[in-house]
Amino acid sequence: MGRKQNIYKDSNGYYFKANLGKDPITGKRLTKTKRGFKTEAEAYREYMVFMLNQTNDQVVSDSYSNENMTFKDFRDQIYLDWYKSRVKPNTFNPRRYCLLKYFEVFEKKNMRDISVLDVQIFQNKLLSSGVCGSYINLLCSLMAGIWDRAKIFGFVEENPFRALGRIRVEKKKINFWTLDDFKVFEKSIFTTNLENKIMLHENLSQTEYYDFFHYLFYRFLFFTGLRFGESAALLWENIDLDEGKIKVLYTVGNRSKKKSEQYLSTPKSKSSERTLFIDSRTILLLKKWRYYQRCSGDIKLVFSHDDVFIDGAWMGVKFKRLQEKFGLPRATLHDMRHSHASLLIHMKENPKMVQERLGHAKIEMTLDIYSHLYPTENFDVVDRLNAISGRE
C-alpha cells in the first residue's frame, strides 16, 4: 500500500502536515504539523480527527477529490470516526454494524453518482426481502446523516436519502398490563407466606429469595415507568427511602456485546435525568430488599446480587415464563413502561405529568405514543361544553 496522503516520516517517527488553506488577510498558505507518532496509522487517525474538528469544515475537501469520493471511503475514513466521538458506545456500535452490513451496493460508487432512483431501488429490495418499514427508515436516516456531513465538505450537492422521504409505517400496537393484571401477578408470586417471612426478616430459601427479587423488580418497573437500563443502573445513593423519591441519573451503557464491558452511563437524553416519587408500598419493599441484599455485602446497585448489572435478556425470559405460568397477557419488560403510562392516564393524570415521569424530551412524544389511551377525552369535552351551553 502507498503512503497515506499528508503523512510523513522523519528520524523521530511519523507526523502529519495539514493544509488549512490561505490566511484571509495575508494570503499565505496555512499549515499545521504534529509529530511524534509511532506508526503511520496513528498519525493518520490523528490527522483525520484534527481535520474534522476544524472550525472551517471545508478544509477536509482539500485533501480529497470531490469527484472521486466513494461512499466506502467517506464512511470508513471520515464519517465513522467523527460519529463515534459524538454518540455513546451503545448507540455507535449497533449503527456502525448497520452501516457496514446493509450498504454494500453503494460502497464502490462515487457519492455524487448515487441518485434518488438508486435509493428507491434499495428501499424496494429491502422491502421485498422482508425488512420492516420502520427499520428501513432507520437505515435511510443513518445514510441521510452521512450525506448531510458529506455536503458540508462539498463531496455532494444533494441528499438523495432526504429527497425520497420515509416509508409509511403503521403504528405498532402497544401492549400493557392493567392494574388488575398486575394484581394477579402479585398474588401469584408474592404469596402471603412469603410476604410474612419478609416482613419479619426471616431466613428465605433460595427460591423465595429469587421470587422476592423478581417480584420487586417487575413491580418497580410497573409503578415507576423507568426504562430497564435506568432501573438496572439505579444506585442506593440515589434513593431517598425516607422521602420516597429516586433520582434517575444513570443507565447501563454497553461498549460491546460483552457483559463485562457494561458501565454506568448517562441517560439517553438530558430530560431523562429526573427525580420522581414512588409509592409507599414499593418503598417498604425496597427497605426489606436492602436488608436481605446486605447479607451478601455492601452492594451499591439496587437491583443486583453481587454489584454486577442484572442480565436484561434473562430478566425478559424469566418474565415471559412467569406470564405463561400465571396465564397473564404477553408483555415485555419495556411494556411495563407503557403499563405505567396507561395507569397514570387511567388515573386521569395530565399528559405533562406523564411526560415528566417517563423522561420524554417533548410532550409531543408522549401524546404521539399514548394518544389512543385517552378514548373518553372527546366525550368529556362534549359533556363540559353541554354543561356551559345549556343543552341537555
Image (cartoon, rainbow, N blue to C red):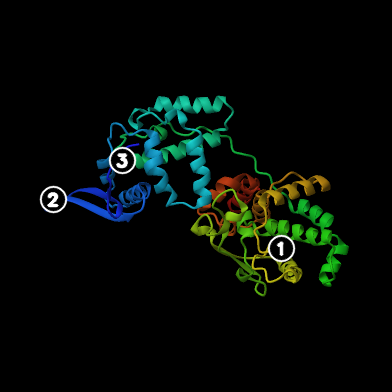
Residue 227 visible in rendering: no
The residue type indicated by label 2 comes to Lys
Residues at marks 1 and 3, CA–CA distance in whole angstroms? 54 Å
Q: Classify residue 228 by image quadrant.
A: bottom right
Residue 61 in the image, given as x and y percentages of width and height: 27, 41
Q: Which residue is mark 1?
A: 305
Tag 1 near tag 2, CB within 8 Å: no
> Which circle marks residue 28 in the picture?
2
The residue type indicated by label 3 comes to Arg
Residue 109 in the image, given as x and y percentages of width and height: 38, 28
Residue 43 in the image, given as x and y percentages of width and height: 34, 50
Residues at marks 1 and 2, CA–CA distance in whole angstroms? 65 Å
Mark 1 and mark 3 lie on one chain; the one further toward the N terminus is: 3
Q: Which residue is mark 3?
A: 3
Residue 237 visible in rendering: yes
73 or 315: which is nearer to us? 73
169 or 204: which is nearer to us? 204
